[in-house]
Image (cartoon, rainbow, N blue to C red):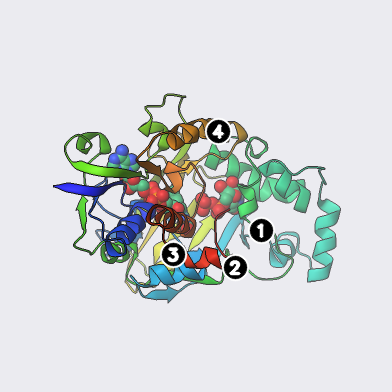
Amino acid sequence: MAFDYLIVGAGFSGSVLAERMARVAGKRVLLIDKRPHIAGNAYDHHDEAGVLVHRYGPHIFHTNSREVFDYLGQFTEWRPYQHRVRASVDGQLLPIPINLDTVNTLYGLKLSAYDVEGFFSAAAERCEQVKTSEDVIVNRVGRELYEKFFRNYTRKQWGMDPSELDAQVTARVPVRTNRDDRYFTDTYQAMPRHGYTRMFERILDHPGIKVMLNTTFAEIAEEVSFDEVIYTGPIDEYFGYCFGRLPYRSLRFAFETHDVPQVQPVAVINHPNEQPYTRVTEFKHLTGQVHPKSTLVYEYPQAEGDPYYPVPRQENAALYQQYKALADATPGVHFVGRLGTYKYYNMDQVTAQALTLFAKLSGRPRAERAQGGGVLA
Ligand code: FAD
Ligand code: UDP
């Protein structure tokens, strides 16, 4: 059988492109994944106890892009959900992002929103240029809060000190002077009502899309006939690591089911300091599932294993640029997604990136970009 596109990876980027190519452009698509399931890292399923869990850690959907929200909304109903996280610090569960209540509870103070700005300013160590993930936080709230909430979490998560990581990593977490304790403030915050995997099943439900699981690119490339490749796996792997390996950070997930309906007050508790894990997630807060039992997942960062996080550092960006130049000079192969473009992108960003690539390949303009919107960093 001959295909127009061989798409490697059935996560957000590969699946969105498969859908657009088949449904809008009328192409014949073969979508493969080496894993035994679709949905990439967003894959969810019911565990042995019947609790809906995310196999690769908590995935919370949030975006400012109406285009992305509406696009995915064709394939799922949404369940409104505002994410809240607490950090376990000095024996207390405190709001993170750091806000007015974090400071007042931690120090037994009664500061107002106005006072707390002065509190942060007095503690802040101003740096001329905010370059690293240490600079971002120390420059805003000072060293003490940095050490309690950020330094050790980041060391665990990334295996290096925040001073060795680009500013964009800790800049993902804002600092607030009000009492807003939501993790995100995006316009659209919601979870797919029947889960991510169900949404992906609907994205891929088209006669022009053939899905092959448990199949690597290396296994299939010589066996089928296709015109072009869209590749969402690691770009360095595609090119046989010819310039050396791009570093990725991995995680080990430890699931635990409890015989009670609820264990934690909020979906996620971050553990910046004493524990070997970084955070613990109780899925039922995210999914809204009603069930007599509850499953939690502990995240243990590690160097080896599936590549989950590109590591934002200048030297890694420079190495990626070498691969990108090679990719640009390789006809018929298009790289996209978190691994294909080595970008620390959220789900909405990879969806937007996939829609942009579709617009480029098909010659059909993207509605929102034409209006100046968009979610790419
Ligand atoms: P992936 O989902 O990684 O899909 C790539 C697929 O390609 C994989 O399924 C892989 O098996 C397959 N593949 C790779 N190489 C090959 C090969 N050679 N042959 C065949 N198949 C191959 N984003 C959010 O917006 N909100 C969150 O709360 C959030 N939480 C996250 C938590 C964790 C722990 C992690 C790791 C990520 C989180 N993300 C979150 C980010 C989100 O997972 C990504 O943005 C998104 O899944 C990227 O989609 P993708 O299609 O680019 O890549
Ligand atoms: N971070 C931290 N303490 C926290 C939360 C986050 O030090 O309590 C840092 C850490 O380096 C983390 C980064 O901020 O990797 C981004 O946090 P986010 O919650 O966005 O991480 P993700 O969900 O992508 O793993």
The amino acid marked with disc number 4 is Asn
Q: Relative to residue 105, is residue 31 depicted above or below? A: above
Type of amino acid at the residue the image marks with label 2: Thr
According to the picture, the residue beneath numbered tag 1 turns out to be 174
Distance (Cα) linking label 4 and label 1:
25 Å
Q: Depth-wise, is mark 4 or mark 1 nearer the camera? A: 4
Circle 3: is it few (<14), some (14-19), or many (20+) Cα within 10 Å?
some
Depth-wise, is mark 1 or mark 3 nearer the camera?
1
Q: Nearer the viewer, residue 315 or 376?
A: 376
For marks 2 and 1, give the CA distance: 10 Å
Q: Do the residues labelled 4 and 1 touch (CB within 8 Å)?
A: no
Q: Which residue corresponds to the image point at 43% horizontal and 43% vertical from the top-left?
A: 339
Where is residue 274 shown, x and y percent of the image? 57, 44
Which residue is denoted by mark 4 in the rendering? 316
Indicate the position of residue 90 as horizontal and vertical percent values: 65, 53
Name the residue furthest front.
Answer: 363
Q: Name the residue under label 3.
A: 263
- Between label 3 and label 4, give the one nearer the viewer: 4
